[in-house]
């Protein structure tokens, strides 16, 4: 019996294939992987390394610390994948991953993600194959694999049939340019470990849906204004 083809596929070029699927093999993304809503294939860059030692890197021209991944080795690994789809290189130098980019990538049927290690990869490889560089934030990880996992996680939860009806992506943070309002559940009156009684906002048990929506929007606006002036500015000026 032939396996059903997944609608969203990722090729991962990595020196550490054993890192995958990692957390993506659990919970909702794990179920979706089992159900072939999405699929992935690791291509071990080491398999394409040079010589008996399967060397994948070398010292940088011009000197300096660290090692650089060789373009010839990565190209062989890339070409082994067949049609690569959209080519992405995870890098702190890339454009910042946003929910808009996640939504775009989740509707792109095939991605090939290059996960770098060491100081990075030879620039000529990125130029020759027109890799798009994407960063998950302004900090430096020891390699691109965790960054690729984060990008994939954010995409997978948007794929059809992954979240079911339990969650509503249209009300979460960023969907309207604002951070999410606070949530509360039972008990309505809760005494914390320090003995403080903590109750919930009255409006949430009023049954008045218009007021509840209004309160939630106010909270979202307040939190966004306080925590993320950059998002707030964009929201009030109506720019994206
Ligand atoms: N590799 C190392 N740091 C990274 C980052 N911040 N984003 C994406 N890839 C990375």
Image (cartoon, rainbow, N blue to C red):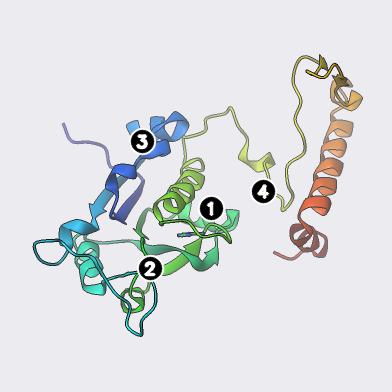
Residue 35, visible in the rendered structure? no
Residue sitting nearer the eye, 180 or 109: 180
Look at the numbered disc 3 and say if its residue's Cβ is closer than 8 Å to ligand 1: no
* Label pair 3/4, CB-CB below 8 angstroms: no
Q: Please identify the quadrant where the C terminus is shown.
A: bottom right
How far from the left and from the top, in percent, is residue 205?
86, 20
Mark positioned earlier in the residue sequence (2 or 3)? 3
**Separation of disc 4 and disc 1 at Cα?**
10 Å
**Separation of disc 2 and disc 3 at Cα?**
30 Å
Mark positioned earlier in the residue sequence (4 or 1)? 1
Q: Please tell me the numbered disc located at residue 103.
A: 1
- Whether residue 169 sits left or right of residue 154 in the image: it is right
- Furthest-bottom residue in this view: 62
Q: Is residue 41 above or below residue 75?
A: above
**Separation of disc 3 and disc 4 at Cα?**
25 Å
Residue 19, visible in the rendered structure? yes
* Label pair 1/3, CB-CB below 8 angstroms: no
Q: Is residue 168 above or below residue 176?
A: above
**Separation of disc 1 and disc 3 at Cα?**
19 Å
**Separation of disc 4 and disc 2 at Cα?**
33 Å
**Secondary structure beneath label 4:** loop
Q: Please tell me the numbered disc located at residue 33.
A: 3
Q: Please tell me the numbered disc located at residue 175.
A: 4
How far from the left and from the top, in percent, is residue 174?
67, 50
Residue at 52% of width from left, 54% of height from top?
A: 102
Residue at 39% of width from left, 78% of height from top?
A: 64
Mark positioned earlier in the residue sequence (3 or 4)? 3
Residue at mark 2: 120
**Secondary structure beneath label 3:** helix
Binning the other alpha carbons within 10 Å of mark 3 as few (below 14), some (14 to 19) or many (20 upward) gives: many
Binning the other alpha carbons within 10 Å of mark 1 as few (below 14), some (14 to 19) or many (20 upward) gives: some
């Amino acid at each position: 019996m032939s396996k059903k083809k997944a609608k969203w596929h990722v090729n991962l070029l990595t020196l550490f294939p054993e890192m995958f699927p990692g957390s993506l093999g659990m919970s909702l993304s794990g179920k979706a992987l089992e159900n072939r809503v999405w699929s992935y294939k690791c291509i071990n860059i080491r398999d394409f390394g040079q010589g008996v030692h399967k060397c994948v890197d070398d010292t940088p021209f011009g000197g300096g610390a660290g090692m650089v991944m060789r373009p010839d080795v990565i190209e062989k690994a890339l070409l082994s994948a067949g049609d690569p789809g959209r080519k992405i290189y995870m890098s702190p130098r890339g454009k910042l991953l946003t929910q808009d980019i996640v939504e775009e990538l989740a509707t792109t049927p095939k991605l090939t993600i290059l996960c770098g290690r060491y100081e990075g990869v030879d620039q000529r490889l990125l130029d020759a194959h027109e890799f798009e560089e994407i960063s998950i934030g302004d900090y430096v990880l020891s390699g691109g694999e965790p960054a690729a996992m984060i990008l994939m996680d954010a995409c997978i939860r948007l794929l059809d049939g992954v979240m079911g009806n339990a969650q509503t992506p249209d009300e979460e943070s960023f969907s309207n340019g604002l951070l999410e309002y606070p949530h509360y559940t039972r008990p309505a009156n809760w005494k914390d470990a320090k003995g403080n009684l903590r109750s919930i906002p009255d409006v949430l048990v009023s049954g008045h849906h218009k007021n509840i929506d209004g309160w939630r929007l106010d909270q979202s606006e307040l939190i966004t204004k306080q925590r993320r002036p950059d998002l707030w500015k964009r929201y009030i000026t109506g720019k994206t």
